[in-house]
Image (cartoon, rainbow, N blue to C red):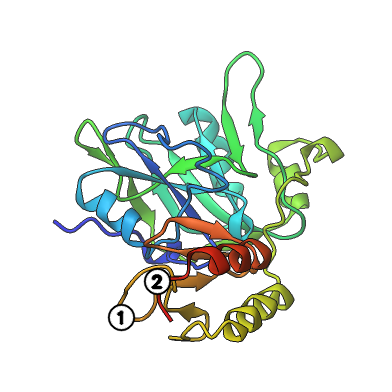
Amino acid sequence: MKREIPEQLKNELFMFCLIAKNTKFPFEPKWNTENCYKFFEPKLLNHLLKGGNLGVICGYGSLIVIDFDDADYQLQKSNLLPKTFTCKSAGKGLNHFYYILKGDMISKIGIGSDKRLCDIQANKSPITCPPSTINSKSYSVVEDLPIAEIEYETISRIFEINLLKRHLKGEINYEPSPEKVQQSIEMLLSLRVQRKGQNRFACPFHESNGSGNLLVYPDGAIKCFHCERFFNIHTFRRFYEKHKVVI
C-alpha cells in the first residue's frame, strides 16, 4: 500500500520533519528550523518510501494540534472542540485535533499537573502524523474534514486556561510575506536564473530538468531540493557569485 500524506496536510505553508522508522523522534539536527521540508520535496518522499515516519511541525501555517494523553479527559473535552481534521495516534490510540490558530502563534502548553492530560502542540513542536507507523500500528485519519480555525478564547474556555504573554512565541515569523517573496523573485530574475513557474526556478548550482528545484517560500526564503540549502536574498547572491555552474 502506498504511504500517502493526508490531503489536509498538503499545504505549502506547512513544514515537516523526518522521523526515524518505528519512533516519534526527529533525527536530524535543527529539524524545526533548517532541516524541515514541504510535503512534496523529494527527500521527504524518499524517506516515506523507505518506511520512515513523519512529523508535521506546528507553528508553520499557524498550525496547532490538540494532542490528548488521557482517554477520560479526551472524552470530557472532545465534544466541546470545533469539528476538524482529526487523527488517531499509533500508541495510545488517542486523538490529535488539527487547527489553524487565529492570531499570534503560542508556545506549547501542557495541561495537567499530577498527570499529563493533554498537550497543545504549537510553536516549533512536532506531532507525528499519518502515514507514520509504530510497531505495525498506524497513525490514521478518524475525521476526514478540512482543518478548522480556532481562537484563543475557545482554547481558554474549553481547557480552563489563560493564554498569557509567556505563551506567545516570537522567535520565528511564520506569516507569509508577499513583499519578501517578490524581492527574492526579482533578485533571481536579475541574476538571470531560469524561471520555471510562479515561485520555481532552475537551480544555477547544478544541472537539472523538470519544473525547477529552486523554490521561493512564502516568507521569501529560497531553497533548492537538490542542494538542500536555505538562502535569503543576500546569501544566495554571494553563493551564486562564488559557485554558479549553470546559466
- Residue 233 in percent (x, y) is at 65, 68
Q: Hey, which residue is sitting farthest top in the picture?
A: 114
Q: Secondary structure at mark 2?
A: loop
Residue 245 at least partly seen: yes
Q: Amino acid at mark 1?
A: Gly
Q: What residue does disc 1 label? A: 210
Q: Are marks 2 and 1 in contact (CB under 8 Å)?
A: yes
Query: Which of the pair 30/84 is nearer the observer?
Result: 30
- Residue 222: name its quadrant: bottom right
Q: Hey, which residue is sitting farthest right in the picture?
A: 165
| Residue at x-position 54% and y-position 48% | 34
Q: Amino acid at mark 2?
A: Asn
Query: Which of the pair 90/195 is nearer the observer?
Result: 195
Quarter of the figure that contains the C terminus:
bottom left
Q: What residue does disc 2 label? A: 213
48 vs 6: above or below: above
Residue 83 at least partly seen: no
| Residue at x-position 25% and y-position 54% | 46
